[in-house]
Image (tube, helix red, strand yellow):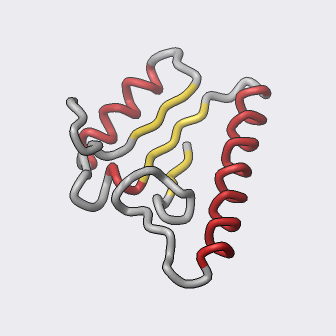
C-alpha cells in the first residue's frame, strides 16, 4: 500500500501545481518519480503482489473523501481479488 503526496507524485488533482520557478527541473523530477512509481508497481505485480495507492487528495483539501471512506475502500479491496486500488478525492464534475 502506497500513500502518495499529490505534488511529489504528479497527481492530476487540485493539489498539484507545477512551480513557476525552475519549471523544467521540477517537471523532469516529477516525471521521473511517476516513471519510478509505475515501474515499482509493475515489478510488485509481476511478483504476485497486489498494489494499492492512497492519494493525498483523498484525505486533504477540497476534494477529500475522508478517512472513513478511505478505510472502507481499502477494506473492500483487501477482501477482494482486484490487483490494483487507487483511492483519490472527488474530481470536479465526477459523480460518486
Residue in the foreground of this view, choosing between 2 and 37: 37
Residue in the foreground of this view, choosing between 25 and 59: 25
With respect to residue 33, does 27 lie above or below?
below
Which residue is at 25% across, 52% downward?
Answer: 63
Which x, y percent locates residue 42? Answer: 73, 34
Q: Quadrant of residue 74?
A: top left
Residue in the foreground of this view, choosing between 57 and 20: 20
Q: Quadrant of residue 26?
A: bottom right
Q: Quadrant of the N terminus?
A: top right
Which x, y percent locates residue 94? Answer: 24, 35
Which x, y percent locates residue 45? Answer: 71, 28
Compared across the picture, whether 72 is left or right of 44 comes to left
Which residue is at 38% across, 53% downward?
Answer: 13
Which residue is at 59% across, 34% downward?
Answer: 51
With respect to residue 77, does 58 lie above or below?
below
Which residue is at 78% across, 26% downward?
Answer: 46
Which x, y percent locates residue 29? Answer: 68, 67
Q: Quadrant of residue 61?
A: bottom left
Compared across the picture, whether 73 is left or right of 38 comes to left
Residue reaching furthest to the bottom? 21
Across the whole image, how many numbered discs are drawn on residues? 0
Compared across the picture, whether 67 is left or right of 33 comes to left
Q: Quadrant of the C terminus?
A: top left
Amino acid at each position: 500500500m502506497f500513500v502518495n503526496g499529490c505534488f511529489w507524485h504528479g497527481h492530476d488533482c487540485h493539489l498539484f501545481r507545477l512551480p513557476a520557478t525552475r519549471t523544467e527541473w521540477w517537471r523532469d523530477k516529477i516525471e521521473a518519480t511517476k516513471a519510478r512509481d509505475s515501474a515499482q508497481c509493475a515489478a510488485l505485480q509481476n511478483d504476485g503482489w497486489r498494489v494499492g495507492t492512497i492519494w493525498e487528495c483523498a484525505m486533504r483539501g477540497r476534494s477529500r473523501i475522508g478517512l472513513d471512506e478511505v478505510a472502507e475502500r481499502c477494506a473492500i479491496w483487501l477482501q477482494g481479488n482486484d490487483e490494483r486500488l487507487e483511492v483519490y478525492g472527488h474530481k470536479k464534475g465526477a459523480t460518486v
